[in-house]
Image (cartoon, grey):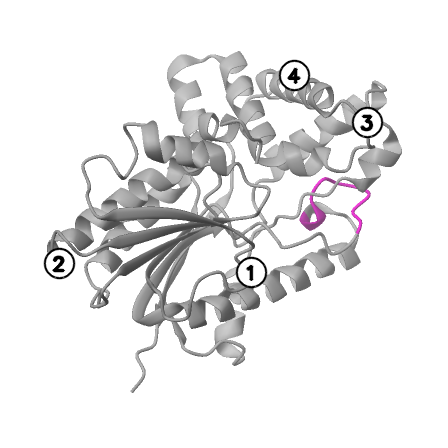
Amino acid sequence: MQGGGFYNRNSALQAANLGSALPLLVAAAGEVPADGAIIGIADYGVSQGRNSMAPVAAAIDTLRPRIGPDRPIVVSHVDLPSNDFGSLFTLIDEDPVSYLAGRAQVYPNAIGRSHFGEVLPHGSVDLGWSSNALHWMSRNPCPVPDHGWGVFSADPAVRDAIDAQLDADWANFLQARSREMRGGARLICQFMGRGPDSHGFEWMANAFWQSWVDTADAGLLTHAELARISAPSAGRSVAQIEAPFRDGRVSGLSLVDLAVVQAPDPYWAAFEQSGDAAQLGRVWADMMRAANGPSFAAALDPGRDRAAVLDAVTERLAARIAADPQQNRSYNVILVIEAVVAG
């Protein structure tokens, strides 16, 4: 994600996405055993933290009457070492939306490691949360010369490689959580899924990619650089999510609930009220830059002015959307996982 707090300022879509999972988190906070000396909350894929404040606050407020005023709650925020943790801790320390505001005995920390491996001690997590993160893969499994996302490539071998990587990453994520979660702990996840007849997100993915193609055609990057671009993200189907539970690769965890729902589009809702196509273009373009710009720009040659390229792509994308406003169609996965209590 683009640093300097830019993602925090341009992630309204992600905030809307996680809303449908919040009631499940609150319900889980009211039901997990929570009988340890320290209560552990894990936030897998925190980014810069804006969209973690309300969920963590809701979880704490549900747990506190159950555990009393003095029991410590440790909140562990997990993301890659390259994440903008400075913006996260500034938000936690200074912003009125911080879950520390008015709440005592809460101790935040950050872990700069991939959540596709173990990041916390065995049996230390009572409640887990992950939003807008698990559609990101651990790596790009192959070159994708014809699109910015392999899942939209015309080459079936590329799409198969993406699905294989999604499968391996999902199994690794679950296996790591099976060791970190205490018996009876719950993990609530929300991330990009696939629809019944399409992946979803095609309109915006194609518009973003075409804006990069146009920028290359204008000479601001080479077509060789363009061919190296591939964002390591894709949605999962219900069958792909269920697979590790069904084939025995994951033990100690139970898939309690799973749903795929159409994702909200708060930008379109605002456009319907205002009719301002230019504003619709700006908010979409800034969001796409914040969420996907760094992974695209990583393929550019050393010495290339990445900010200038991103400025040009963002301008082209905003104009493209303003010229042809559409409602985005994509899908959210919402699921609840429980750690099995040893009998």
Q: Of marks 4 and 1, which one's residue comes earlier in the chain?
A: 1
Horizontal side of 206 relative to 322 (left or right) equals right
Q: Secondary structure at mark 1?
A: loop
Horizontal and vertical percent position of residue 150: 71, 48
Q: Nearer the viewer, residue 118 or 189?
A: 118
- Residue under label 4, please give it: 315
CA separation in Å, label 2 and label 4: 51 Å
- Give the image quarter of residue 339: bottom left
Q: Amino acid at mark 3?
A: Gly
Q: Main secondary structure of the magenta part?
A: loop
Q: Answer whether residue 150 is magenta in the image.
A: yes
Query: For the N terminus, which image quadrant?
Result: top right
Horizontal side of 139 relative to 29 (left or right) equals right
Q: Amino acid at mark 2?
A: Arg
Horizontal and vertical percent position of residue 127: 32, 59
Q: Of marks 2 and 3, which one's residue comes earlier in the chain?
A: 2
Q: Amino acid at mark 1?
A: Phe
For the point 26% across and 61% down, which residue is it?
A: 38
Q: Secondary structure at mark 4?
A: helix
Q: Residues within 10 Å of mark 3 (few under 14, many from 20)?
A: few
Horizontal and vertical percent position of residue 19: 34, 42
- Residue under label 2, please give it: 66
Q: Secondary structure at mark 3?
A: loop
- Residue under label 1, please give it: 116
CA separation in Å, label 2 and label 3: 55 Å
Q: Of marks 1 and 2, which one's residue comes earlier in the chain?
A: 2
Q: Which residues, given as a range, are shown in magenta?
A: 143-151
For the point 53% across and 73% down, which residue is it?
A: 244
- Residue under label 3, please give it: 303
For the point 87% across and 28% down, which residue is it?
A: 222
Would residue 326 be seen by someone viewing this image from the given angle? Answer: no
CA separation in Å, label 1 and label 2: 31 Å
